Amino acid sequence: MRRRTLLTGFAGGLIAAGTGPAFASAARRVRHVRPGGSVQAAVDAVVAAGGAGWTVVVHPGTYREVVNIPAQAAELTIRGATRDPRDTVIVYDNANGTRKPDGSGTYGTAGSATFTSAAPGLTVRDLTLANDWLRADHPEITGTQAVAAYVTGDRSQFTRVRFLAHQDTLFADTTALTAFDRHYYRDCYIEGDVDFVFGRARAVFERCHFHTLDRDVAFKPEGMVFAPATARANPYGFLAVRGLVTSGAEDGAYRIARPWVPSYETTAWPSLVVRDTWLGPGIDAVTPYINMRDAYPWQTMRFREYGNSGPGAVTSVPENRPQLTAAEAHEHTRRTYLGDWCPDERP
């Protein structure tokens, strides 16, 4: 029940999402969503008005709803009205194995997301995206992936956003198997347990804080931070730079990553670089990587580190911690990953 206690503590308690009006400014192309209103209703109104270049300002409160941003809402900005992402929370509780109300089956992993976006040029700032579904509340469900955000559009940017869930928190993916969609996450907080940052995107996580949750299980590892599924043709996958990895679990309970080779794309060649990042004692420093399936050993994947520090970064078994050379490190920067896209860096 920890997740629900955490969420309902914000902004004076739970505020149900309703169908109240979102207030618009025609001159500035801005719509405001206030408690009792609906973020999705504001997005729908933006799409109906032409879709591109709008800003949706979400005022402090907890909005219990699923939000879906379609591709035609290009260059959309969604931001909390304050600079504190704890003030504005969008949350729901679907899981992979949750049955749909119409009886057509279950949601699946991607379909479980509280927040979904396929819009190119999306900017999200200063709010929380959460999925508060809990395994303990639903022992009958075996599909326990419960996604906070599923993002596929190219040039998707998140700044000071909190992503909260357990398994599969942030699905950073692409619009198609042949697409190399780029994402940029800056000053974000991302927490979870199993594979909680995963997908095919070319994604940069700069100055982000990753936090692993404690699990009441008897086995180790309790989980993994990253599970990239990078396309073989994509030269870059996930880059975590100048970040922080902390843990609510015991020392050594987590691994940095395991490679995800999806059944629908068995040619994937997962890529992850973690550099200039502090790794806390929750990371197993001796064996920081693990296989998802033995047919795809992590040693054959593009997993590298460079310049990391902290107890979880101690190299006692060098073959378990492949490192970039200084020359190679110059190829793994925000600029090389994002190419001609320069994300907005306003404070």
Image (cartoon, helix red, strand yellow):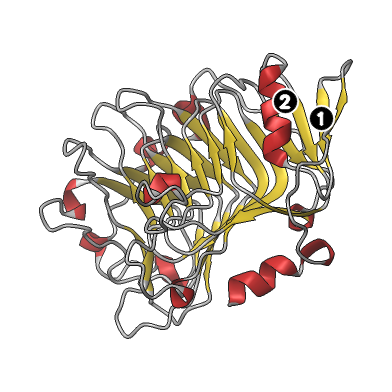
User: Which residue has dot 1 on it?
Assistant: 31
Q: Secondary structure at mark 2?
A: helix
Farthest left residue in view: 295
Q: Quadrant of residue 174?
A: top left
Q: Decide if residue 36 is in sight here.
A: yes
Indicate whether 119 appears above or below 280: above
**Residue 260, x across and y down, in percent:** 27, 49
Q: Residue at x 72, y 68 (%)?
A: 8
Which residue is at the front of the view, 16 or 317?
16
Q: Decide if residue 345 is in sight here.
A: no
Density class for disc 1 (Cα within 10 Å; few <14, some 14-19, many ≥20) is many
Which residue is at the front of the view, 305 or 74?
74
Indicate whether 271 appears above or below 331: below
Q: Are marks 1 and 2 in contact (CB under 8 Å)?
A: yes
Which residue type carries mark 1? Arg
Q: Secondary structure at mark 1?
A: strand
Q: Residue at x 53, y 39 (%)?
A: 116
Farthest front residue in view: 102
Q: Is residue 36 left or right of residue 304?
A: right
**Residue 192, x across and y down, in percent:** 49, 63
Q: CA distance from mark 1 to mark 2?
A: 9 Å
**Residue 188, x across and y down, in percent:** 62, 50
**Residue 105, x across and y down, in percent:** 34, 50
Q: Quadrant of residue 167?
A: bottom left
